[in-house]
Amino acid sequence: MPRRIAIGIRGIGHRVIDSTWRLGYASRFFLLILLKSGTSLRRFGLVIRELYFTGVLSLIIIIVSGLFVGMVLGLQGYETLQRFGAESAVGTMVALSLVRELGPVVAALLFASRAGSAITAEIGLMKATEQLAAMEMMAVDPIARVVAPRFWAGVISMPFLAAMFSVVGVFGGYLVAVVLIGVDDGSFWSQMQNAVDFRYDIVNGIIKTCVFGVAVTAVAVFEGYDASPTAEGVSGATTRTVVTSSLVILGLDFVLTSFMFRGMS
Amino acid sequence: MASEILVEVKDLNFSYGERPLLRGINMTMHRGKVIAIMGGSGSGKTTLLRLIGGAIVPTSGHVKVAGKIVHKLKRDELFQLRRKMSMLFQFGALFTDLSVFDNVAFQIREHTDLPESMIRDLVLMKLQAVGLRGAHDLMPAQLSGGMARRVALARSIALDPLLIMYDEPFTGLDPISLTVIGNLIRRLTDALGMTSIVVTHDVQESLKIVDYVYFISDGVIAAHGTPDEVRESVAPFVHQFVHGEEDGPVTFHYPAKAYASDLKLETGLA
Amino acid sequence: MQRATMDLWVGLFVLAGIGALLFLALKVGNMGTYSSADGYTLVGNFENIGGLKVRAPVKSAGVVVGRVTDIQLNTKTFDAAVTMNIDTRYQFPKDTFASILTSGLLGEQYIGLAAGGDDALLKNGDKIMKTNSALVLEEMIGRFLFDKASENKDEKNGKDDKD
């Protein structure tokens, strides 16, 4: 029995050391991307092409999800607030929830699942079919040519996607609360404008989005580059991207929220 | 007529972790020649190519290309050297998101500032050399295996390199494509005055076109010589390989216990 | 995918994104309604600020005229020094009353300015002399009980007198 425990503990130690090593490797990789971003700047066409594939193609899922989230917020918000006679505050509730939390977090999660996994799969497949090795043999740095443009495209598209998510969400809430249920149009918007502070809520939301964008894209790009050059390797890497990104987003959200909204008490 | 030595491999040793893969390899390859490296699967042929290309570093010994020791080069010098080398990967490794034309033009666009009109002419010329000028608009997904490899070949000669390394160029091709690729390798080597290193285990095709052969078995050079010398060799491994014999130094049976004891006949247990 | 079409879509995407950000800033948030650039500073001392927070609104007749920018404890007089930024459009006379009020029954607290009749106006950096502190619940209850107790005592004394 003790022997099994020893083996189990050794396994844990092995895995911890492996993860730490991998984390160090990932950090060095991240630095490499930043250092080799010169090509992305000089040949901005590469970034634009990736912006299309990460940003524009994610629009549909972001907008549809934003609409539904906003509508649900409107419904739930109204249902709870009307118990206290405060239905006119539903605009405030929808807007604050979206701008502070749901916009950045849900948009980032959706982005990780759609665009992040696509990036991982693409880079992983290029590795598996030796395209990256071919590029290296042609004296073209694959990190500068393939990885960095995708990284910057992800970082740039995230804030826009999250903003659109929040806007569409507010409209979703408006649709449900004002158009469907009959909350007063004027008080919906005026209460919201009074309660949502630009610097405090919106800017903080944007900061969160930028941080999430960097984190998610960095994970996606790393997992793709580090994938085993086989079919199982690529599929495993894609799964890891979605899982790791989601955990990182939620963890960072907690850290950022506690920094930003501490002054509330 | 001694031609210049382009690639020199001297006392090369390479170990993967603790497993020695290559031991004491010595090779000389002259300019303008087609050299074949043959051996069984997993014998370290591809590793040798990667060592020559500078993708991995030897454990001891060195590889010299055009007089420069590859693993001692700094990043920039290595990149410079790589522009004069090309590698043809096993299944072509074409960039799947670019058309045939853009694939061949890739190196030209990345490394030179030539105007598009000149690039167009160059690309079409290279494609003409491999017989695929009409396919320049297709995407890699639309090509057959043989065609993909020919496009990859056109891509490799885009910048007129000194050295091309072919990793198993004959694998999985139909008889027609086999001949086409074989002839292309020979013709281009002669026409461009470059050196070709072909890693393969397709004996019949390669012996038709190469100038010299190296056999690798168990991490060492088992034999080397001209195609005629190889065909007449009596060295057991070479003989088995060239004539495709079922049993010889490379045994048919994977090491196992005695057959009778495995079937539990001797001990009388049923 | 042609290069030109891709560029078009990306351009539209970026425009839509910027539009969304602007919409959030102006229509959803309160940036459009108030900017602190053209404002002047006023100070008021309060015995107790209650639950007043920085960035609470300053209102007069219910209209938002400014924001609280700083709250500090004055260690000499031991009362609270509240700094406010008031929109330059609104000028107040020197005898304005500043009170700490609560919006609704349990809502957030804000500063209410009730203008007096003085001709001279408050200038940048001036101190509001007349202030009303926030109503603290415990003090109110304490006062209520005290008043009640003294009422009872007066009644009792009165009764005694009558006897």
Image: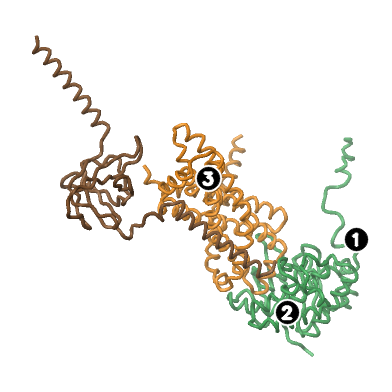
> Which residue lies at the image location 17% right of the left edge and 51% below the top edge?
C118
**Which label was assigned to residue B158?**
2
Q: Colour of chain A?
A: orange
Q: Which residue is mark 1?
A: B246
> Do the residues at pointers 1 and 3 share their chain?
no
Mark 1 neighbour density, 10 Å: few (under 14) some (14–19) many (20 or more)? few
Spot occupied by residue B5 in the image (x, y as percentages of width and height): 73, 84
The colour style of the image is by chain
Residue B192 appears left or right of C135: right
Q: Colour of chain C?
A: brown
Q: Which residue is mark 3?
A: A174
CA distance for labels 2 and 1 = 42 Å
Which image quarter holds the N terminus of chain A? top right
| SS at badge 2 | loop
CA distance for labels 1 and 3 = 78 Å
The amino acid marked with disc number 2 is Ala
Spot occupied by residue B168 in the image (x, y as percentages of width and height): 80, 68
Spot occupied by residue C32 in the image (x, y as percentages of width and height): 41, 56
> Which residue lies at the image location 46% right of the left edge and 53% below the top edge?
C27
